[in-house]
Image: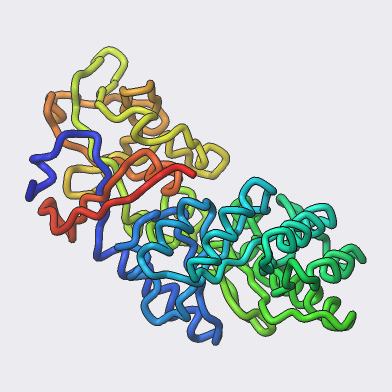
Amino acid sequence: MHDLTQLETPALVLERGKLERNIARMRDHLAKLKVGLRPHVKTAKSFDVARLALAGQPGGITVSTMKEAEQFFARGITNLLYAVGITPNKLDHVAALQKKGADITVILDNVESARMVAARGVALGTRFPALIEIDSDGHRSGVKPGDAVLVDIGRILESDGAQLRGILTHAGDSYNCDTVEKIRAMAAREREAVVQCAAQLRAAGLPCPIVSVGSTPTATYSEDLTGVTEVRAGVYMFFDLVMAGLNVCAIDDVAVSVLATVIGHQPDKNWIITDAGWMAMSRDRGTSSQRVDQGYGVVCDVAGRPLDDLIVASTNQEHGIIGRRGGGSIDVTQYPVGTLLRVLPNHACATAAQHDRYYVVDGGTAITAVWPRFSGW
């Protein structure tokens, strides 16, 4: 297949030029702040994408599944951060990767997990490097800044079966900010939380060589990263409509889309029906709480240009229902059966997870490469 018009649909399309510009923008921004980037590969799940993101970076990546750790280690990336709270049933897998030569770090946020990690390390004859997760925004997991339990966890990790490597936070509440000024304030809050916690550990005589922060919104709008050793971000490579709704990017920066075909119409309802339902797009409705609700995605022509306020207004498993944003009439004769359309996703991670490859284009419909991707745990 040499052109999008030859593909069976639905299919996942990746604009290489936009991908490379997005990566360069983040790289250059963080270089000015004198901090390295540890790309999060959970969105891409593709070595071809990761190698572009790693150019000019220290070489480590962030993963969210052990399958990602396995896949990227097999391609020669040895410095891995598994950035989801570790569970007992994964530690044997972590140890197996260590024995093969991986430098893999886990994270946790409680005394119980720290004791479990240390004990399992002793039992397996290894030491598990770990970061303590910090709650910088009240969004999800982590130790709250100033909590004395931080030092308790740190002391448990400085044992025969574990190794304290530092701290980590993720300002996920930045996704709920409705102005750029609030994102900047969140970025400052994220930094202040980890700097405070690093000082708390060091004052107790504990090591804290790694001070890791990260979310695409806060990474984009950070103005001062003093005291931070690395930034983690992932969706910045592709962007999506949620990021555009936060003014983290423009809609034209979104590098991924789903190719769909018109299979019918319901003129009395002003509907165009396609073969790309929620199995192709995902169920994510992340823009529903933003100023502009993009339904299940913005509809573009086959070259990726947005079309006249059309969105995927509703989905079934294999059917996408296109309507006009806010209602209104559509001349469905402009979109006959067989018309190819592309849909920009709300959440690039969730949409990409529905597909096993990227059809790479560069400003048109000619396919320049096919990059495999993987899913699962």
- Which residue appears at 40% of the width and 73% of the height? 54
Name the residue nearer the viewer: 95 or 69: 95
- Which residue appears at 33% of the width and 70% of the height? 52
Furthest residue toward top: 268
Q: Position of residue 372 (x, y in %)?
A: 27, 51
- Which residue appears at 34% of the width and 69% of the height? 51
> Would residue 185 be visible to someone looking at this image?
no
Q: How many marks?
A: 0
Residue 227 left/right relative to 345:
right
Classify residue 337 by image quadrant: top left
Name the residue nearer the viewer: 306 or 229: 229
Q: Position of residue 254 (x, y in %)?
A: 35, 55
Placement of 200 over or under 184, stated as above or below? below
Placement of 319 over or under 55, stated as above or below? above
Name the residue nearer the viewer: 193 or 68: 68
> Would residue 9 be visible to someone looking at this image?
yes
Residue 276 left/right relative to 179:
left
Q: Position of residue 158 (x, y in %)?
A: 80, 73
Residue 32 left/right relative to 213:
left
Q: Position of residue 264 (x, y in %)?
A: 19, 19
- Which residue appears at 23% of the width and 16% of the height? 267
How are the colours assigned in the image? rainbow
Residue 219 left/right relative to 125:
left
